[in-house]
Image (cartoon, helix red, strand yellow):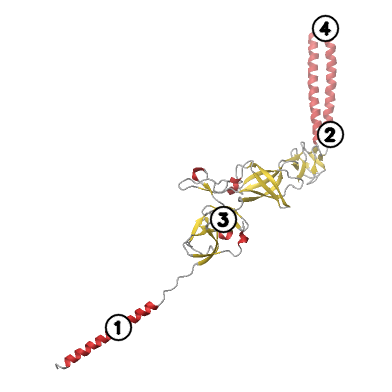
Amino acid sequence: MMSFLPAFLTETAHRRRLALAVATTAIAAATLAACSRKAPPEPPPRPVVAVAATLAEHTPIASLPAQIEARYTTPLSFRVAGKIVERSVRLGDTVKAGQVVARLDPADLSKNAASARAQLDAAQHQLEYATQTLTRDRAQARENLIAPAQLEQSENAYASALAQRNQASQQAALAADQLSYGNLKADRDGVITAEQADTGQNVGAGQPVYQLAWTGDVDVIADVPELALGAFRIGQTATVSLPAIAGKTWQARVREISPAADPMSRTYRAKLTLVSPGPEVKLGMTANVAFAQPLPVVAAPGSAPAAPLAAASGTPSAAGATVAQPITLPSTALFHDGNQPAVWVVRPDDTLVLRRVSIVRYGERTVTVAGGIQPGERIVWQGVHTVTAGEKVRVIPPLHPEDFAS
């Protein structure tokens, strides 16, 4: 019994040492395997097309559709009522001042004039008779051949006849004028732009028959939206081009700006006087009015927002604000931060940050922005909808940068 116990204890201890060695070997092998396994590689930076921002080469120019119109346009109408029996001009005809353009039936007007002349003749005869009577009675009164009361009656009859003659004279002159009013004459040199009554039609006094556009000053009429209203001021010069006359431009000067917006379109009617229009410029032509777009003003920190100014980029303004520098980018670079336009800027460490900007002008394939970015900063041109703020990117140049040249 005593000899078996030491042998059992010796065998148990041996098994324990063997199990411990196996466990130690397994742990070492697992540790070695873990150490030899490589960590997963980080994803490569996302490639984006970005280019350093540069100032716009030219002052941002905005354009508005417009129309050529005469500065003065008046309706031509008869001053008396009647029936139109003749029209001598048509739509688009050029007329001279004093030219007869339409006639009324003269029958009634002629009879009225003849009646007035007859009344004038009768009044003139009465005046002559009263004059002779007064002359005779005055001679007899000096000889005391008639009573003073008879002389007074003669003088009263003369005064009444004179007043009736004067009244009949005015009536005859008015009837003669009305007869002449049966001929509608152009007040000024101009062009007929509308026909509003036809031959055989009975018209009332003052009812328009033609619309006459005066020859002379020509206006360019444009409806200005609220965003561009700050660029317009009385006396400002703008460039006008006509699609119908390619390759030629005219200068125009702002003459009038409506003080209130149109209730339907919410635009302000602006009238510009065209300088030296020339005969090739026709009324009713469509036009484009190009003008310098005001640049946004970036307020200094802690100051009140400043209003837009049409000034050179980087010029200091009141209250420490500066006029934002215009930068032209392709339209694909424009993103949004909430409801505000923004662009992605690549930081020096190749991470992205979103910056809000102000839109100065929309072009055909470009957009001119100001504020939020500085010249030299790298702006993402393409892929703006696939990146996020703080993301690591790899900048590559655009394949065809000339397509977005400003």
Tell me which numbered mark, 1 or 4, is placed earlier along the sequence. 1
* Of the two numbered discs 3 and 4 in the rendering, the one whose residue sits closer to the viewer: 3
- Secondary structure beneath label 3: loop
Q: Which mark is residue 98?
A: none
Q: Give the image quarter of residue 145.
A: top right
In three-dimensional space, the C-alpha distance between marks 3 and 2, rounded to whole angstroms, equals 80 Å
Tell me which numbered mark, 4 or 2, is placed earlier along the sequence. 2
Q: Amino acid at mark 3?
A: Thr
Q: Which residue is mark 1?
A: 23
- 103, above or below 166, in the image: below
Q: Which residue is mark 2?
A: 110
- Secondary structure beneath label 4: helix
Tell me which numbered mark, 3 or 4, is placed earlier along the sequence. 3
Tell me which numbered mark, 1 or 2, is placed earlier along the sequence. 1
Q: Which residue is mark 4?
A: 142
Mark 3 vs 2: CB contact within 8 A: no
In three-dimensional space, the C-alpha distance between marks 3 and 4, rounded to whole angstroms, equals 111 Å
Q: Which residue is mark 3?
A: 54
Q: Whole-percent x and y of residue 218?
A: 72, 43
Seen from this angle, which residue lies furthest left?
Answer: 2
- 79, above or below 28, in the image: above
Mark 1 vs 4: CB contact within 8 A: no
In three-dimensional space, the C-alpha distance between marks 1 and 2, rounded to whole angstroms, equals 138 Å
Residue 338 appears anywhere in the view: no
